[in-house]
Image (cartoon, coloured by chain):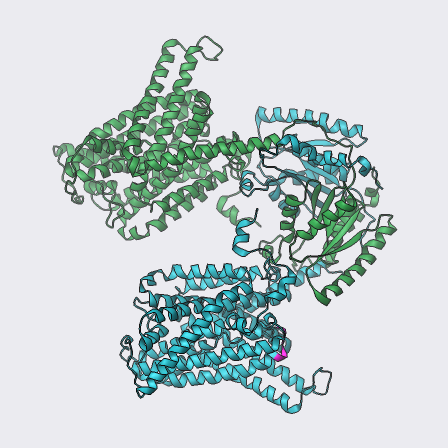
Chain colours: A green, B cyan
Amino acid sequence: MPLSLSRLLIGRPVSNKEAQGHKLGIFSGLPAMGLDGLGSASYGPEAALTILAGTGTAGLAYIGPITWVILALLAILWFSYWQTIKAYPNNGGSYIVAKDNLGINAGLLAAAALMVDYMLNVAVGISAGIGALTSAIPELHAYTLYLCPTVLAVLTVLNLRGTREAGLAWSLPTYIFILTLGFIIAWGVFKAITTGGHPHPVVSPPETHQAVTAVSLWLLLRAFASGCSAMTGVEAVSNGISAFRDPPVKHARATLSAIVLILGLLLLGIAHLAAAYGISAMDQSKDGYQSVLSQLVKAVYGRGWFYDLTITSVLAVLCLSANTSFVDFPRMCRLVARDGFLPRGFAVPGRRLVCSVGILFLTLGSGGLLVAFDGITDRLIPLFAIGAFLSFTMSQSGMAAHWWRAQRKTSGTDARPLSATRGRAKLAINGGGAVATGIALGIILIAKFTDGAWLTIIIIPCTVLLLKIVRHYYDQDDRQLRWETQRSIDLRDHGKPVALVPIKRWDRLSRNAVEYALRLTPDLIALHATTLDGPEAEREETSLKQEWRKFVEEPACEAGLPAPRLLLMPSHFRSVTAPFLKGIEHIQKRLPGRPVMIVLPELVEGRWWGYMMHTHRERRLRAQLLRYGGKRIAVVSVPWQLKPQTPRQGLAQEEPSEPVDKACRHGIRLNTQP
Amino acid sequence: MPLSLSRLLIGRPVSNKEAQGHKLGIFSGLPAMGLDGLGSASYGPEAALTILAGTGTAGLAYIGPITWVILALLAILWFSYWQTIKAYPNNGGSYIVAKDNLGINAGLLAAAALMVDYMLNVAVGISAGIGALTSAIPELHAYTLYLCPTVLAVLTVLNLRGTREAGLAWSLPTYIFILTLGFIIAWGVFKAITTGGHPHPVVSPPETHQAVTAVSLWLLLRAFASGCSAMTGVEAVSNGISAFRDPPVKHARATLSAIVLILGLLLLGIAHLAAAYGISAMDQSKDGYQSVLSQLVKAVYGRGWFYDLTITSVLAVLCLSANTSFVDFPRMCRLVARDGFLPRGFAVPGRRLVCSVGILFLTLGSGGLLVAFDGITDRLIPLFAIGAFLSFTMSQSGMAAHWWRAQRKTSGTDARPLSATRGRAKLAINGGGAVATGIALGIILIAKFTDGAWLTIIIIPCTVLLLKIVRHYYDQDDRQLRWETQRSIDLRDHGKPVALVPIKRWDRLSRNAVEYALRLTPDLIALHATTLDGPEAEREETSLKQEWRKFVEEPACEAGLPAPRLLLMPSHFRSVTAPFLKGIEHIQKRLPGRPVMIVLPELVEGRWWGYMMHTHRERRLRAQLLRYGGKRIAVVSVPWQLKPQTPRQGLAQEEPSEPVDKACRHGIRLNTQP
């Protein structure tokens, strides 16, 4: 098996027809689409608490109200996406919604925001997951920057294998995550209620820092802006409706509802218990770091196997929440590439029905982010929420425009006319969503500007520009290939080309090429480039000339063909291409207007290590000839398969299967053709 | 300029004729060939002192006698190589000498030893150089592992540019090294004599450690074995005689003598002063490390600009001593590759007359060694001397066999008969050299076995085995290409192939390919692989069929050609190759025995970034077709050059230069050929 390594890693090729089998239901959709959203529960509250940490215990009281605001926003998003799913049952990602309703520029803006968002999601998911791990095993803290790329590599390989495997692989941790965390919250709330709001922690969280700043509106806004990262990933379902089983709208809506409900409960519970137990955020870049969830589980239930299980599932869910991006990023890139705004490679589905280029691009981008920000979650968060909220806003505005237009032509050509009331309600919901997410975006932008949000503000427009440049490139390409003059083939000039065959020495390889060339055209010139100097070169030339006369010229003349010529050309610069370009020039001077066809004998080596044994000059030669050889040339590769010499299959037995002999067995009837 | 980056780094291509101008004289040969030998002066004595360090001041007294033994060996080597240079004026490297006189296995053993030796020389030179640097600037000590690869990269680029530039670039540091170190030694010896052997150091060297082991014969043998690394590099001249100006033998001998003389004086002076000033070796892996030379210069002359100059030249010479390997390693690999024991890539001279593959291979190997041994000189030394002394021994034994044979046929056919006495003297010198270096090799092997020499003992035979496997591979290849049956071309089966043209859509690219294919053969089948499903695919197919009929079939029939057919083939696995293999099968079933020619239209993009914009399916397709397509196929690449759309050169002006139009300008006379 020549491709066994990639087969082992990536799996067997998957047929188009198998695509249907890869579809998701609610139970499998929740992990596949919801990991990002649910995983946010562990870094969102922590991000808000990090901002509040400077105020000591005073600020901790505000985590509750901030969370309620976030939940209100979440509810608005739920309503909005509920509608989007119905209106765009074929993947209503922000890109499509914005492009369809607000024009291509808005679409590209949404696409760029999402691309940045997806990359950050991978980086944040992995860094927060490793944060959970190093909370549990502090000895691993020093290896943060080695652990992150490892997780990224594993995710990449799993995703190159395709969505379904991925979905199955993470269902278990997702449900363990929901169950264990749900139990901890329920148990903690029960204890808090029974103790009158002041439960006694099993393991006390580290002392809260002394207040170094006062609580201010500005601080609360910043905490809200950080906390908004808890909402990222909610849009995943609307981007991937086509991945759901029939009827997709129903399954997608149910999955969305489940995600939003669980996320809301988790956020509320975490905020409530953090305030009740006095748990604050710690600095991930310092030794002894404990994530908020780790402190929370310890405080409510203590260390033990349950702690280990919970933290393991948090680690798994966080690392795997990156998976949402791995599902959505390539899918969106494919849509953008189909519109010509990304290189075509992004639109080519790989062997396993996923777009490999998109996956690898995502890996590179998020890997770069992890390295650039040292794998510290808190440094990535400020950049994160912007992309997500910009895409929320674009999507909601697009939907609002959609309903606005639909309402104006209610009695028009629209297939399913809307009643004025229902239409207005839909417009209000999506319009309200757009305004709410827009305001949140503004707050995040202002509050996080100096913390890194400025970077996002530079990157997103640059990405839009790049996308437009790509499209411009393809437009230019297409203009060259498109028709302006005649479209039918032109057979007025229909002369045979002159064949130019490079000959290193007279062996089977050369003979094979010469014979093939003589099938195609009677005019043949062989080219021998001499790289040697002195007597050695002369001896070689003389013997080659003799062989040529005897083994080529004479048989050709006997068969009534013009005598193939042998051209010797010195190569002073040991360049592979130069003598050929000279040879082409030579032919074009002597036989003006005749096209030239370079016939390259090519040794084909089936074994991967055999590849290293050859210089592969003919590949470079072909590429350079195609590039510099002018318009009227073509390059013909005539293969000669090298066979490994196994004992049971010696050369003697293979001899008869050589091209010419085989043809003879089939009779020479072939020779008599029009 | 498309290749401007590589041109900037590597320089313009150099013609074969310029080779003569790159030759060395004595003055330029001393740095080019002697850097390795001279550089050894700084790590050889230090390596011996490292072993003696454990014995405190007691062992320091033995550095003198050990050095004298080393000098005696050095003198023997001088005599031996003096003869070798004359006997092998065309590069008498150990490989050639051993191969010619002792057979191919001995030659390969010498080659393997040398390959290991050269790699270690690069690693040791760089690590010792960085050791000198960190002695002078202790702050840099922590960056040892970053500095080493940087130096390696700079050396690689300089050497890819070619030998002469390299020689010029390091002449200055070499001569400064010799002059400053010579001055220090002379001044130190003068002070030692005037103070009765007990000079007062300007800057006291660090306290010698307390004795932890007693002086024993075993310890002295180990010190000698380590000290032998001071002799490495002496063979460089005999490997590179052809690099010298005419008369090469005279220049090579003079250079060899100069190197040996200077090296001997340096070794003697360093040993003498180390004992007089009580300077011992320190541990390079510890902070505060000071190389022996650094301590010596400080003790004799103190710190100041002269110290800085000396240490800078030591640094430069040590780092550049690696250059000897960069000159010799690719040259030897080329000889070995020409004999078929290394992949052919090693024998291809690059644009600048140097063998790039060999240089890059050396860089990789020595880089690996630097990383594996943490860039610590002392850990590399035990492996180092083995390769050098094995190759010395092979070379000397080979020369002894040479004289032995020459003597036996003194009156025979030999061009220059030897007098019996002179012949016996030569035999004695080389035989004595072989015995002496053989004994030294044995001592080094035993004394250094557990310190890492065992590794060399494993690596060298493995390398020999690999070399033989490579040769076996080429022998098998050659057996397939060599003649056993008829050598002249066979024109009995001479039928035209059937052309198979992949068509994505009907555009200029496709038209170009179809037109070219129809020049070569009248039988043409176009293949459209459908990757889409559903109504979209059907619509596409219908329109393509119509276009095909109108724009291809009709004109072809009018011109009296058989109607080119359009074949639609679904591609369930989105594989690029599968439909073509099926197409080939289809043709071979319907038209048995007819060869198939796949005509691939290829977009040629001149700009490097444009490369990323295309999927390059046709390259993968071509490679896979050549590999799996069977024996009777060939692949024709028909290029279509994409032109960047500059304002002054619009599409409208370029239109007439299209292939067909250009041909029309040349007249249709082309159409009338035999």
- The answer to whether residue B639 is above or below residue B254 is above
Q: Residue B196 location, x and y as percent?
A: 31, 88
Residue A553 sits in which quadrant? Answer: bottom right
Image spot of residue B625 (x, y percent):
65, 44
Look at the image and tell me whether residue A31 can be seen: no
When the figure is inspected, residue A134 is found, relative to residue B564, above or below; the finding is below
B235 and B549: which is toward the camera:
B235
Q: Give whichever of B316, A575 is nearer the camera.
A: B316
Q: Residue at x 78, y 63 (%)?
A: A542
**Above or below: residue A242 compared with residue B518:** above
Q: Is residue A525 visible?
A: yes
> Which residue is situated farthest in the bottom direction here?
B421
- Magenta span main SS: loop
Residue B175 x %, y %: 46, 72
- Which one is in front, A286 or B596? A286
- Please give the name of the residue rendered at 50% of the width and 47% of the height, measured from the top-left corner: A8
- Range of magenta residues: B86-90
Horizontal relation, residue B347 to residue A451: left or right: right
Total number of numbered discs in the rendering: 0
Could you tell whether B411 is left or right of A365 in the image?
right
Residue B87 among magenta residues: yes
